[in-house]
Amino acid sequence: MAPTLQQQHYLPTYQGSNIKASAKWNNFQAALFPYLRHCPTPAQYLGAKNKYPSNWFKPSSNSISAMASPSITLDRILAAVPVTTRGQPTQISADSKGQRIAYPCGKSIFVRSIDDPSDTKEYTGHTAPTTVARFAPSGFKIASGDSSGMLKVWEPESIDSTRGEYAIISGRLNDIAWDGESQRVIAVGDGREQFGRCITADSGNSVGEIIGHSKSVNAVAMKPQRPFRAATVGDDGNMVFYHGAPYKFNNKSAQHTGFVLGAAYSPDGNTLVTVGADKRIQLYDGKTGEPTKEIGQGEHTGSIFAVSWSQDGKKFVTASADQTVKLWDVDAGSVTQTWKFGGDATVGDQQVGVVFVPGRSDGLIISLSLEGQLTYLTEGKEEPVRVYGHNRGITALSTASNGKGADLWSGSFDGRVCHWDIKSGIAAVVDGQAHTNQVAQFAVADGKAFSAGWDDNLRIVDESAKTFLGSSAKLQAQPKGVSAANGLVYVATYSGISVYSDEKLVSEQSLDYTPGAIAASGSFVAVGANENSVRIYSTGSDGKLQEVKALSNPTGTISALTFSKDGSHLAAGNSVGKIYVYSAESWELVADRWSAHTARVTSIAWDDTGAYAASGSLDTNVFVWCLEKKNQGKRIKAANAHKDGVNGVAWIEGGKVASAGGDASVKIWSVQNLP
């Protein structure tokens, strides 16, 4: 059999008479070319090589694959939806080509394709909760702000680098605007000494001042053409007008009688519009700042949070707390279409953000509800397209019970439970009575997903209908974890173990320790104890637990437990980042070198073969481990997978790993060339 080693790969590494046989050569020889046993040294192989035709040395996919190193790379992001605050607008920005939107969530900014919501990038340069992001008119830069008053300028294509970082105010940034040349930025918010600054985007040099307000500034708009103008609006009810550049105070107007929440310039710069909590829509001359007329009296019945112009400047759209989005004809001063969301007085359906997407022929409008739902609207069509997800940290993650790895369940800090179709990247919020507090963990079995929440309830989801079933089971105390096996569901709480069958409580057992985690497989139940041990119980159809073994190897409180799919191994992660693996046949320790995490292990998941395990931790990292004895010390790392920590991992179809965490997103990782 002829060797298939790629010649150019081999020669730079091994040619030269001074190279001796080494472990590296031996491993290489054994792994790739068993037929080279007659060439014990690189030098002898070089000599033999000259005797064979050159086509013997053409690369093959098998040889190249065998030489490749194990790796884990980000495949895609199933993004969070925008974070919202009741009573405040949330800004959504679209690029000039109409291809992407940008918005804040957690400490990240998400840049998301409009046509393919699963095509997403995440900017993680902020260290405080983000509040706003705006595309430059060129589309090549984004300016984003956070609750500490820090402004970052970066490129959406090279999302890992920051071009500028500027301290604007000592408080929350509420809005950002770019001038028409994509060179100057005005950022405004709720500062203690000032409410905003005008700077150059590339250097942070001052190009004016923001004065004239006595309270927090909520929004800013900049005239896109010369002569440059700008307007700011705030809680003091004023619209302050500036001439620039440099931008200087020119005049102020007090047409509103309450908080002014939004402002926007028409694309031609001729008209400025402001909206506010007084339900007023006020128009101004774009060059002088003089009020021209009020329109739409009585149309909105709640605060108007946001306004955005169409590309041709003939229309604009408003979003309101009355749960409506309205499309306006500017010249006529009248509504041409209204979209109503939710039932009567449904707080979560208040519309707190809106953008009229430029650069498109379909007249697309994207609105945002208080509960974080993005809705795609098109003029003349009543039925919207909705995009769901989480906007609070994800605290639990699981695959569906069918074992195919094509679906995921996720639960978040606010109690929301979502179903994800991995192929499309689309999420659906589970209907019915949801949790009112953090989802602690999922267990899946027989077409059902069992979720334990910090509202002290065990709720059941019908996986096919994606709906909560019936009433919840009230738990005796706050849950620490949940697991299912042999038709029984086991819930570990601060006070003990509760066992359910057919959605009914069949057994309760108090413990002399506080559980930290739970896992079940077959007739065994493993419980992590707070005294640095794992307790193993046997159980029957009656749900009664009988302790059979105490595993005392762990060096910290057990925080994660999981059995391999065939039940042959148990992995236990602890509060100091170490993972132990036990044989379920003898309960002997078989792996104790999985110790790369530097903080509490939150989740462990085995692949279908039981040969590999993935883990997530509060240290923000995801690791993939190998159980095979000779490779137990090897691992591959996805560094900084989630800001504020990884809270869940799962293996999905295609041998990929899914992870979820404090950034409210789910990430899919491609794992290649495992040993």
Image (cartoon, rainbow, N blue to C red):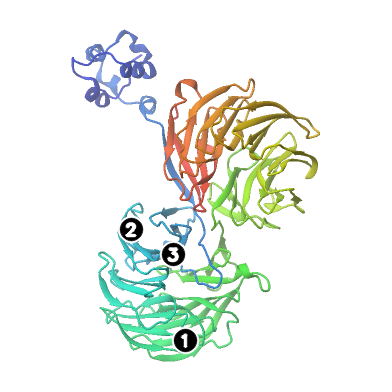
Can residue 114 be seen by looking at this rendering? no
Name the foreground residue: 179 vs 394. Answer: 394
Name the foreground residue: 374 vs 348. Answer: 348
Q: Quadrant of residue 546?
A: top right
On screen, residue 155 above or below 499: below
Q: Are marks 1 and 3 in contact (CB under 8 Å)?
A: no
Query: Secondary structure beneath disc 3?
Result: loop
Mark 2 crowd level (few <14, some 14–19, many ≥20, 10 Å Cα): some
Q: Whole-percent x and y of residue 345? A: 66, 73
On screen, residue 320 above or below 62: below
Residue shown at 61% from the left, 67% from the top: 348
Q: Earlier in the sequence, mark 1 or mark 3?
A: 3
Q: Earlier in the sequence, mark 2 or mark 3?
A: 3
Q: Amino acid at mark 2?
A: Glu
Q: Whole-percent x and y of residue 431? A: 68, 57
Residue carrying label 1: 282
Query: Secondary structure beneath disc 2?
Result: loop
Q: Earlier in the sequence, mark 2 or mark 1?
A: 2
Q: CA distance from mark 1 to mark 3?
A: 29 Å
Q: Amino acid at mark 3?
A: Ser
Residue carrying label 2: 155
Q: Which mark is residue 419?
A: none
Residue carrying label 3: 147
Mark 3 crowd level (few <14, some 14–19, many ≥20, 10 Å Cα): many
